[in-house]
Image: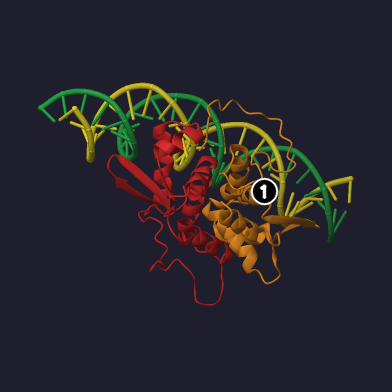
Chain colours: A orange, B red, C yellow, D green
Amino acid sequence: MFGHNKSMTALPTLEPATGQDCCDPAGQPALGAEEAKRKALVFKALADPNRLRLLSIVKAESSGESCVCDLTEPLGLGQPTVSHHLKILVDAGLLHREKRGTWAYYSLVPGALDDVAGILAAL
Amino acid sequence: MFGHNKSMTALPTLEPATGQDCCDPAGQPALGAEEAKRKALVFKALADPNRLRLLSIVKAESSGESCVCDLTEPLGLGQPTVSHHLKILVDAGLLHREKRGTWAYYSLVPGALDDVAGILAAL
DNA sequence: TCCATACATTGATGAATGTCAATGTTCGGG
DNA sequence: CCCGAACATTGACATTCATCAATGTATGGA
């Protein structure tokens, strides 16, 4: 089906980042390289036990949000490590960060996990 | 070094571990450590662009299955690398491998991606 | 103004991961 | 019985990652 696909050159760091980058809109001829790399970022964020637990804890909180000080103890990790994991989850679009006073409150981005499920369904 | 759990022997058999680690029966008290590690294995398998493309190609194939020789070219990877990725996807329970003659045919495990979506919904 | 709190950032280090070249294994054909 | 094709496995290497200790930053109170 695929005629030729050889020269996977180096990184074209210039990326439009607006709209799709690879697939012709006809059918779904499998993921393109750039598209796959982008979608893999979300799964990379989910591919760590402690980050899964962070999402789970934040989701289970009745207030819908948690601060870092409430997250270090249940994970048994240091505060810098928890901040690092939280940043990865925020960058992946899964968590939202809001600073109030000296505290930073993290909450689930509404629909973000559903979007990930949508990626799986549209593979 | 902290007390890190070393007894990692099981593949992602999506089965409620009989250990004491999981959930206390109160309600939704967040993921336990062992449970999170097990679920993270599936996302680790998905956390690579080339593996996402492999799943996508296999799924898009009209016959429902692909052999390795048809997968190396569209990815621009060597045959050992593709075999390595396929093994990870099989071990994660996402792909099924069937050997016929000298060829190895890979196909999506029915419902496997839906199960991953279920993990997300049940976080 | 000064200090303690809550969190982020940096630097370092050991472990895990992705890739390829080389080699091993299994199968079918002559 | 040997040879080539298809695939898996091994070993090596560079990159990425998870973690912690130390330090930086901002906020609020005394």
Which chain letter goes with mark 1?
A: A
Q: Residue at x 56, y 76 (%)?
A: B27
Residue A19 at x, y = what percent? Answer: 73, 43
Q: Nearer the viewer, residue A107 or D30?
A: A107
Could you say whether the residue bearing mark 1 is in a helix, strand or loop? helix
- Residue B68 rendering spot, x and y as whole percentages: 40, 39
Q: Quadrant of residue C9?
A: top right
Front position in the image: A31 or C1: A31
Give left or right: position of B104 versus A113.
Answer: left
Total count of labels: 1
Above or below for A73 versus D11: below
Q: Amino acid at mark 1?
A: Lys
Q: Residue furthest bottom?
A: B26
**Place of residue B116 in the rendered image (x, y in percent of width and height, measured from the top left):** 51, 59
**Residue A69 lies in what quarter of the image?**
bottom right
Q: For the C terminus of chain B, which image quadrant?
A: bottom right
Residue density around tag 1, few if under 14, some if 14–19, many if 20 or more, within 10 Å: some
Q: Is residue B45 above or below residue A112?
A: above
Q: B106 or C17, which lies in front?
A: B106
Camera-nearest residue between B58 and A36: B58
In percent of width and height, residue A97 lies at: 74, 55
Label 1 belongs to which residue?
A87
